[in-house]
Each structure stands twice: as structure tokens, then as C-alpha cells.
Amino acid sequence: MTKPLITRRTVLRGAGVALGLPWLEAASTTPRHPVRMAALYMPNGVNVPAWTPQGQGRDFQLSPTLQPLAPLKDKITVLSNLWNANSKGGDGHYVKEAAILTCATIKKTPGADIANATSVDQVAAQRTANLTPLPSLELGVTPVAIGVDAVVGYTRIYGSHIAWSNPTTPLAREINPRSVYERLFRASSGPQGNAAKMEALLLDRVLGDAKRLRGQVGAEDRVRLDEYLSVMRSLEERVQRASTAGKTTWKARAPIDPKSAPTDQPVDHAQHVRLMLDMIALAFQTDTTRISTFMFGNAVSNVSFRFLPGVSAGHHDVSHHQNDAGKLRQYQIISQWHIEQFAYLLQKLDNMQEGEGTVLDHSMVLFASALSDGNRHDPHRLPLVLGGRGGGRIDSGQHLVYSDDSPMANLFVSMLDAFGAPVERFADSTGYLPGLLKGV
């Protein structure tokens, strides 16, 4: 071993955390290209017959819903028959959708005593948090839902977050594309000590006001404030660390032009989604972070897709199709639109040259829904597609069909290994997914 490029005491400036000895790439004189990991979540499930490809292995045909991925067929892996056993009970949505990246059983509660588990993205982020300005980037397009879903008795906070830094802390999402761009620019521009201290002071003031207000409102509003405070804990921790962290030896892999910031007022849902996906691509290209999550919508999302030809209703409405042919057709159109956005991000990453490959070659981007058939709230045979080659570890270009009810947690164990953060077990995992990793 030669002298490490990063010492044990290296810490970073930004929303980061000081860790011990970094992963092996930091101790090499010829560091490999970083591996990135992202998860894109779509609510409400899919039209299953229009989703599942024909054939398996490398000899498979993309389904109508997955057809937008045809130009990238050799860089994707379709995964069939995985499920999250720990989400089989409970209500139709929250139990399953809050646990899409944790594979845990969430606690049923209408208040602030939430309980889930650490999500796979944050397990990975813990390993690389001291190598990039931002340990992870959580994005969405819909504001956090507050209050209690009276039909099922769960706090709506569960339906607004898929990234959890620990069982009681969902990570705050950013939904303004311009704010995300400015955050990436600040992170790539070096230490911003004064700015971080000002942000900490502002956050202290807001949290102080919220805590004082709690003693002046009724029980229902106290629940809403408790939900707000539980989400803000993660932001408070990151801002506090940013104001005290030391300098970093990190350097951006590509420049960020401050004059190219996107609008903070997207004209519609489609533009909003594309802008947020652009932010993931920019973050990965510059190496500002190697971990990101994106929510197309909250659980039970009823975003209107009337802008799509042939669709006349909201997403959640058509997911409860009751086998009506017209609703099933609209359900498929909406799912295919989401896959088109997934393909847009993959193609953008594949157009970014990096060494002899592309940023997509050095990434893993998971598209997932926590339900298969939304009409039955079915957690079996989850719709999952993994884009990218994970730095050469993923044996892509396949449709991998597993035995019924194979643990989705096995996928996460495999992804963590490819990322460089191997674990012996994640949730109810039983090992690696056969055929996904080269050499395993």
C-alpha cells in the first residue's frame, strides 16, 4: 500500500459527517471512478401484464411499459418476483411505501413516535459521506404531507419519505430545482463557513418558534408540529455539521455554472420531474454526492396525468382499476410515462463520458414501486428495474426471474457490495441475488 490520499482525520465541509478510515478507493494512488447509487420511487404500482417482459436471461423482450428503455437494454436489469415480506401487513399504502428502501415493518402511529429502519441508500452514504461535499441528496416534487390518514390510522409522514438515516429520522427532501442547483454549486465551490453558520442560526430560530408554538395549539396541531420536527431533525444535524466541519481535499469532476440555474417555478409536473432528474445527473457528474433518492410522488399520489393522451384521471384513481379496460389502459400509459423519465435520466448519465466508460457505467439507478397491482395493494412481484453497471460489477442486459417471494433485501445486499459498502445482512436478506453481480 502506498501513502493514503485521504487521512484518517479527513472531514468535509458541507452537510457531511466526520468518519474514520475511508473506503479503499481513498487509499489508492490510482483511484477508480466513483460508483454512484440512486433510487427512483413511483407510487401506486403498475399494470402488471403490461409490465412483465417476455423471456428471461439475455433472451428477453421488453414489455410495452418498459419499451422506452430499448436503447439502453444492455445497460439495464429487469428483476422479477422480489418482494418485501415485512410490509405484507397493515394498510394498503403506507406500510409498503415507507419501507421500499428499508425492507422493514413500520410502526403504526398517528403521531411523532414514528419507527422504520435505516434505508439502503443511507447505509451506502455512511461509507462515502467523508468523500463528497454532500453525503446524499433527497429530492421530490410534492410537498411533505402532514396529518393522519383517518382511513387507516397512519401518519402521512410515512408516505412522504423513502430515505431514512435511522429508524426515527426520515430525511428532508428538496422539491425546488433552483434551490438544489444552488446547493450543489455552493458545495462544489469550497468551504462556505459563514453561509453555513447563517443557515444554522436561521434553522435554530425556525425550530425554536415551532417548539414554542407547540404549547399554544390543540392536540391535532401538536401532532402536525411533531411530524414537522421529526423530519427537521435530520436537516438540523446536517446544518450543524456544515458549520463546524473542516476543509476537504475533494475536487469537482466537472464545473457547475452558477448562471445555468434552472427555474424555481416549473410550469408543470412533467417539467418539474425532468428538472429534478437533471439535478441527480449533475450531482453524479460532478461527484458532489454519490447517493440520491427521488420520489415521483407521495404515497397515495393522485397527480393528474391528463396531459398524457388517453388519460383522463389522477394516478391513484386509475390504479384502482377494478379490471376496467379503460382504467387499465390509462394505468399503463401513466406507468410508461414514468419509465420514460427513468430512461431520460439513464440516457443523460450515459452521455457523460468518464474514462473509458460513462457515468451510467459507474452507477446503479433503481426504479421501483412498493406495489405491483395497485388495485389489490399487492406487495408481491414488485416492479423493479436496475439501470447501470455499478462500476462493472452489475451483469446488466438481463431479465432475472427469481422464485416467488424472493427477498428484495437480497437486491440491496448485492447493490451495497457493488457500491463498495458490503454488509453481511440487510433486513430479511438471505444472500446475494444470483446472476446480478459478476463473479458471484
Image (cartoon, rainbow, N blue to C red):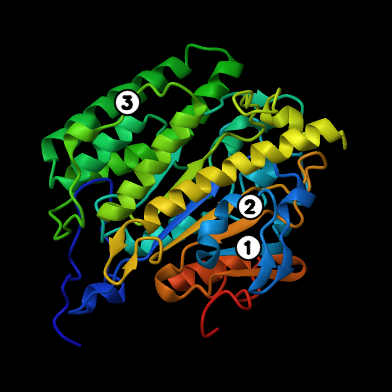
Position of 351 relative to 344 (above/below): below
Measure the C-alpha gap from mark 2 to mark 3. 30 Å
The picture places residue 224, in percent across and down from the top left corner, at 54, 23
**Residue type indicated by callout 2:** Leu
Amino acid at dot 3: Thr
Identify the mark nearer the N-term, 2 or 3. Answer: 2
Residue to which mark 3 is pinned: 263
Residue at disc 2, secondary structure: loop
Residue at x-position 67% and y-position 32%: 300
In contact (CB < 8 Å): disc 2 and disc 1 = yes
Asked if the residue under mark 3 is in contact with the one under mark 1, i.e. CB atoms within 8 Å, the reply is: no
Task: Report the quarter where the C terminus lies.
Answer: bottom right
Residue 355 shown left or right of residue 402 in the figure: left
Residue denoted by label 1: 78
In percent of width and height, residue 262 lies at 30, 30
* Marker disc for residue 66: 2
